[in-house]
Image: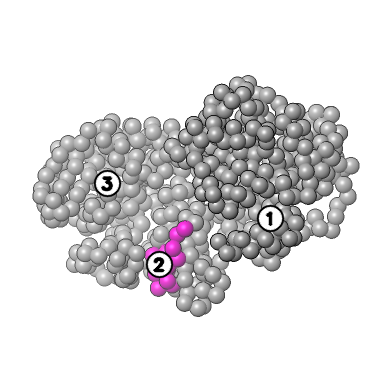
Amino acid sequence: MRNSLALQIGPVAFRVGSVWRAPIEALAGLYAGYPAPEDGICDFTVRLEPEKPWRRWLRPSVAIQGDYILPDAAPLPLGMGLLAAEMGMNLQMALGQKRYLLLHAASVEKDGRALILTGESGAGKSTFAALLGERGWRLMGDEFALLDLETGMLRAFPRAVSLKNGAIALMEREVIPTRFGPRLDGTPKGSIRHMRPDAAAIARMGEGARPALLLFPRFGAAEAVRPVGQAEIFMRLTQASTNYVALGAAGFDALTRLVSTIPSAAVDYPDTDTAIGLVDELWRQAA
Amino acid sequence: MRNAGLLVQALRDPASLADPDWSGLIAAARAEQLLGSLAVRLEGMKLPAKIATILEAARRDSAHARTQALWEAEMARRALVPTGIPVILLKGTAFHAAGLDAHQGRSVGDLDILVPRERIEEAEAALIAAGWERIKSAEGYDDLYYRQWMHELPPLIHRDRDRMIDVHHTILPLTARPTPDAAALIADSVVLDGGLRVLLPADMIVHAAAHLLADGDLAGGLRNLWDIDRLLREFAADPGFWPTLVERARRHQLGNAVGRALRLASRLYGTPVDHAVAGRARWSDRLFAARLLARNGWGQERRKALRFAFYIRSHWLRMPPLMLARHLWTKARA
């Protein structure tokens, strides 16, 4: 395609092609410093195409295409081309990734051990992980946690963090401006601003970590820590996985191993400082 | 990679690949639903590490798809056992169940079965009792159209497993000019261990050729042609196969489609074919080959005008002109 970019993110290589220049330039800016794929070979292809031929010029409208697509996905205006590229990469992972069990979860690492944060959309795990990434942890990913089917190790997948609404201002206070992408208002999920993880997270994207603690954070409730039974954890993680069913027995084995080997808890927190205190405490207990 | 020629080359002669556009090859293979087949063909070769990993995941995916396809066939068998209706598996599921070479890496979407036309409503009722549900409204035009003119029931989907079943009573729409001998397809089918049936080898080729060339616009045709290549290579070991194929193609009024399918398989995949059965090369074979290859290394469809011409042809094959006009009129008003 006329404009394209290849990106290595953890163990996965993407190429994104577009008939327009702007989305690829925005993507290249956001992912500055990321390595190119080894041998130039990519796992997945994303294409940003005009929804209809004339929509390339006339009220340009971006349809998200690629190896795997959602037939009824709504197109986005060209101004949100960066978001379209991000959604396209997410879609390839959600529908096409068959090498790792994919958990809709954020993860951070310390001393070779991984903390996994999962929960419903809007529970605050993305923001929380981004914050931990600025406070001495290595950010492994805010959207997908990749569990290796054979080794049970967690692989890093440090995409740009997708900050939404209130989280944008919170992180703008913590992080230098050059690590942010453009602010996108009026998207289907409200305001979005992407943030590049810090240099260490990018430099060490090839390093995996042993899962050590699993938390279900929930923002907005009074401080509380509750145990969660293994059966419930298993069920919640099957719901949080986009490819559990598609992997069949391999997915079941990997998930069973994870659930039966690491401690876990549900954590309610009224504000981020409380949350960080709770995590430090639980992390010490798990060690 | 301007067309799918590299994909065809990789399937036909993997050893001939010399530092190809790997990303393009993978994208085109995915778009043509041939990644599993490619993974089987390239197994054991010295490959870049990334490609080896991608293909390893594709093989694991194929193995799971096979388990699911066979399970779905077994579910249909159990649902239909009490009726005593013979259940003949078609297409991908048949290749898997019969253990044919064509099953290796073959993806399977819907379950396709063939039953005698006079018992198709009984089969539908038994499937609905076992948890399959109608997708299309039972009173709508689509439903009526299927029941009056098509070779299959409106698709049913299982409410728990979310898998579709297409119940056929023959292999071409009733509006198509050729009229296959559905009774012979059923009478000469081959029983497998467990009670499910598959078509006679020659009939499998006739069906694959009909599906590729006499019913549709050739979208995704490289996969169907790859089926034909794999089947022919396996069946041709039987010295009686080619004469039987001639006889069955004639009986099903599909001699032209079978001849063209053989020529295209030979042209693209180097399939060894009996040239007396394939017939003389025609100028239009080139158009068909170009249509099959209309996919680039970004996975995009190319040759818009050519594809549109084949789309028009598919409607032309399926319906006489007056009926087509009425159909389009009704669809436009809906």
Residue A82: assigned label: 2
In front of the other: A141 or B162: B162
Q: Residue furthest front?
A: B139
Please say if B145 is above or below B106.
below
Residue for badge 1: B217
B182 is higher (above) or lower (below) than A195? above
Residue A118 shows which numbered tag? 3
Reply yes or no: does residue A80 show up in magenta. Answer: yes
Looking at the rendering, the stretch of residues picked out in magenta corresponds to A72-84
Amino acid identity at mark 3: Thr
Q: Please provide percent x and percent y for residue B61.
A: 51, 39
Compared across the picture, whether A150 is left or right of B81 comes to left
Residue A142 position, x and y percent, is 30, 53
The local secondary structure at tag 1 comes to: loop
The chain letter under disc 1 is B
* Crowding near the residue tagged with mark 3, few <14, some 14–19, many ≥20 C-alpha atoms within 10 Å: many
Question: Does mark 3 fall on the same chain as mark 1?
Answer: no
Q: Residue at x 77, y 34 (%)?
A: B202
